Image (tube, rainbow, N blue to C red):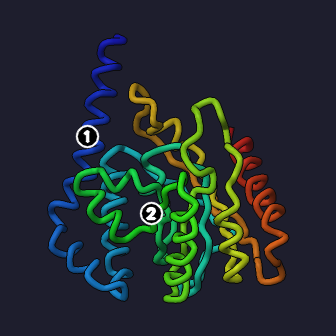
């Protein structure tokens, strides 16, 4: 029985990468055209959402989204969520329909096909470089001015499997305060169980999501960064404990 389980997990992981690559190959001309100009990004974003749904449904994941508030189209937000899985990117794309740009680690740009578009549409950061972290703020500022939202996983990486929620970095909250945009805390309940970074694990099933009430920043200044960080983390941590 154990042999069949390991065989399933191996094939399941291979199937994931097939699902990641197939829509990119099929939609390559449209995707390529959509990244030629920044103002065409909303069209690219629509294609990315199709790609994300294709992968999640193909993996046997069905998503259940609860919303305390819904982002208004045309407004900018700082989207944050806990980070446990390769499927977090896809689930975020499915959860939020407002066009947004990911801030993510530069290593993902090395993934064949996916990386080609990732490095041309996302804001890449080398967390070991202070210069790179500063450049993130400048690029994010330009995207926010164009009416887009920003998505950051504030744990700064994927924590060890035994950690429910790691400490948050301050960057997302400083950026939100500087630009007077609301922070949108989002909790992903089941991604670690469904498709974690542990190779021999995972399987089809529900992916629960909760979009929490937004945290306004228009009354805050930079000295409130840490308290906004802690409030956001407490909301997500308490929801993770509630989900169980």
- Dividing the picture into quarters, in which one does residue 24 lie? bottom left
Q: Residue 42, position in %: x, y?
A: 38, 81
The picture places residue 166, in percent across and down from the top left corner, at 67, 43
What kind of element bears circle 1? helix
Is 95 displayed left or right of 237 in the figure?
left
- The residue that mark 2 highlights is 124
Percent across and percent down for residue 221 are: 82, 78
How many labels, in total?
Answer: 2
Q: Is residue 70 above or below residue 167?
A: below
Spatial CA span between label 2 and label 1: 27 Å
Does 19 sit above or below residue 123? Answer: above
Position in image of residue 204 (x %, y %): 40, 38
Report which quarter residue 180 is drawn in.
Answer: bottom right
The answer to whether residue 65 is above or below residue 158 is: below
Work out which quarter of the rendered image holds the N terminus and state it. top left
Judging depth in this view, the residue of 48 and 56 nearest the camera is 48
Residue at the spot x=61%, y=76% of the render?
77
Q: Answer left or right for 168 relative to 99.
A: right
Query: Mark 2 Cα within 10 Å, few/some/many (few <14, many 20+)?
Result: many
Q: Quadrant of residue 138?
A: bottom right
Residue under pointer 1: 15
Q: Secondary structure at mark 2?
A: strand
Closer to the eye: label 2 or 1: 2
Q: Would you say the residues marked 2 and 1 are in contact, meaning their CB atoms lie under 8 Å apart?
A: no
Locate the C terminus and report the quarter of the image it occupies.
Answer: top right
> Residue 92 has which mark?
none
Could you tell me which residue is drawn at 43 percent across and 28 percent down? 201
- Asked whether 181 or 125 is in front, the reply is 125
- Sequence order check, earlier mark of 2 and 1: 1
Residue at 77%, 48% in the rendered image: 238
Q: Which residue lies at the image location 34% right of the left edge and 63% below the top edge?
A: 118
The crowd level at tag 1 (other Cα within 10 Å; few <14, some 14-19, many 20+) is some
């Amino acid at each position: 029985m154990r042999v069949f389980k390991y065989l399933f997990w191996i094939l399941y992981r291979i199937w994931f990468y097939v699902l990641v690559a197939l829509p990119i190959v099929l939609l390559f001309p449209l995707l390529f055209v959509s990244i030629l100009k920044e103002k065409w990004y909303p069209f690219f974003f629509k294609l990315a959402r199709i790609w994300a749904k294709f992968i999640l449904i193909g993996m046997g994941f069905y998503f259940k989204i609860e919303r305390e508030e819904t982002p208004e189209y045309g407004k900018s937000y700082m989207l944050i969520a806990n980070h446990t899985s390769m499927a977090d990117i896809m689930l975020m794309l499915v959860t939020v329909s407002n066009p947004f740009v990911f801030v993510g680690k530069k290593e993902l740009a090395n993934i064949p096909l996916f990386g080609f578009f990732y490095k041309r549409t996302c804001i890449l950061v080398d967390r070991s470089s202070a210069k790179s972290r500063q450049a993130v703020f400048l690029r994010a500022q330009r995207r926010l001015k164009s009416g887009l939202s920003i998505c950051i996983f504030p744990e700064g990486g994927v924590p060890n499997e035994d950690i429910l929620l790691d400490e948050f970095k301050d960057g997302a909250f400083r950026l939100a305060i500087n630009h007077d945009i609301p922070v949108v805390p989002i909790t992903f309940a089941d991604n670690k169980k469904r498709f974690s970074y542990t190779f021999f694990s995972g399987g089809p099933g529900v992916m629960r999501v909760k979009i929490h009430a937004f945290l306004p920043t228009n009354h805050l200044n930079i000295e409130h960064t840490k308290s906004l960080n802690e409030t956001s983390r407490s909301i997500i941590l308490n929801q993770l404990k509630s989900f169980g």
